[in-house]
Amino acid sequence: MRLAELAATSEAVRATSRRTEKVERLAAALRRMAPYEVEAGVAFLSGELRQRQIGVGWAALRDLPAGAAEPTLTVADADRAFARIGAFTGPGSQAARREALGTLFARATDPERAFLIALLLGDLRQGALAGVMTEAVARAADVPRDAVRRAVMLRGDLAAVAAVALADGASGLEGIGLEVGRPVHPMLAAPGDDLDAALARVAGPAAVEFKLDGARIQVHRDGDDVRVFSRSLDDVTARVPEVVEAARALRATTAVLDGEAIALREDGRPRPFQETAARFASGAGPALTPQFFDVLHADGEDLLDAPGSERFAALEALVPESLRVPRGTAADAQAVLDEALARGHEGVMVKALDAPYAAGARGAGWLKVKPRHTLDLVILAAEWGHGRRRGWLSNLHLGARAGHGFVMLGKTFKGLTDAMLTWQTEHLLRLEVGREDHVVVVRPELVVEIAFDGVQSSPRYPGGVALRFARVLRHRPDKRASRADTLDSVLAIHARR
């Protein structure tokens, strides 16, 4: 398939808001692909590279050569080029990468170049999310959608599952099962408004456990062979030898466990999340303690479809209490939440005891409940958006009052609807005092109410702290900037950790 045809499909999918039309256009494109193109084609249409990251950012795309007048590139050509570019390492790799990029883009027409740039920058926002693409694969292969969804859950790779579905149909999908050593997509939690609402939403027997602010891990053990995977299914085994050691000490020959790795102080309280993240990313820093909360396989028995009550019982039999996330019953829910907060953790998870492990899904089986912090902050600047948000001022620079001015605490574009983006663009442009590249600096007058999960130390900002998972709740044009929250208020929240 020509890359131009894939780019045209992507644009057509972006241009329609109708899910059924998106699915049909994607399915039609999949049917036209050669078997060896399917994995790359599905990845590209999902806005991803098969190689994940290849070391290309804005700087590498600034001075590209002129493109081609007629399309000649194929999907396979682009995939091979990405693989080659990502393989460059060591001295001279940056120059070699630029040269290979230039060769690729010289063969691309203008529509293909726009598609490739969006793909490389992670900015291909045409609405072909995993659910839409899963449905398109099912439509193209004429197989049940649930069969594709389950295969993706177990294989952890939609592109690879699509290749099996289109080549071998339903029988091929049936052959995909849980394999010790191959990660599955982790089950995700939906937010719960509060403890009572979460328990009511589960509407059945439930467990309540601590919600830790750690790094998600999935541990696979087969004899002495242990592999540890991140939430994004990357193999991080070499970075966490203490997790490997703990897994080898468990009472099982084969096992697949779900949990968190977290840096703890001597008193058992969590260290700042940056320390966990830095240790998890580089292998340097304080030791991480594994804390497991689920088991997907134990000694030859797959437990994915077993209810939570059975999986949790199997976990207790397999993992010592010191390596399990503390858990209580629905009757003790408030006490569990109070204890979790008192010990410095985020909140609790409410988990249905009659629900299977829904890998890759975010539903009512698991609900997370944590206190929500809010602050009224002042917008100091805003960045022009790109992709679907092109033409709007999107990423907001947030500041708290400090002395006679404001101190920046971070940025966010989360929570902004199209209507909010339109309103704030018009309003902020009236407050503009200057521009720095793609950043519009404004008079510090517009207040926004910001929700966030916590405060962390940060050398990037003059106040020494930054908000975690900040999101906009609403604009507050009714509130003067002089009444916004202060840096002292933010530091007080930070000090409580």
Image (spheres, rainbow, N blue to C red):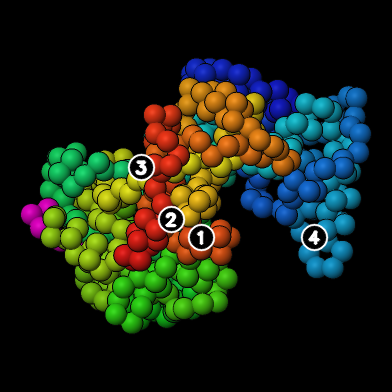
Crowdedness of circle 3 by 10 Å Cα count: few (<14), some, many (20+)? some
**Residue 455 spot, x, y in % from top left:** 41, 58
Please report whichever mark, 2 or 3, sits nearer to the chain's N-terminal start: 3
The three-letter amino acid code for the residue at tag 1 is: Gly
Q: Residue 329: say if magenta.
A: yes
Quarter placement of the C terminus: bottom left
Query: Which mark's residue is nearer the viewer, 2 or 3?
Result: 2
Q: Amino acid at mark 4?
A: Phe
Discs 1, 3 touching: Cβ within 8 Å:
no
Span shown in magenta = 327-332
**How busy is the neighbourhood of tag 2: few (under 14 within 10 Å), some, or many (20 plus)?**
many
**67 relative to 439 in the view: left or right:** right
Say which residue appears at 27% left-offset and 51% top-offset.
Answer: 371
- What's the CA distance linking mark 1 and mark 4? 39 Å
Mark 1 neighbour class, 10 Å CA radius: few under 14, some 14 to 19, many 20 or more? many
Query: Which label lies toward us, 1 or 3?
Result: 1
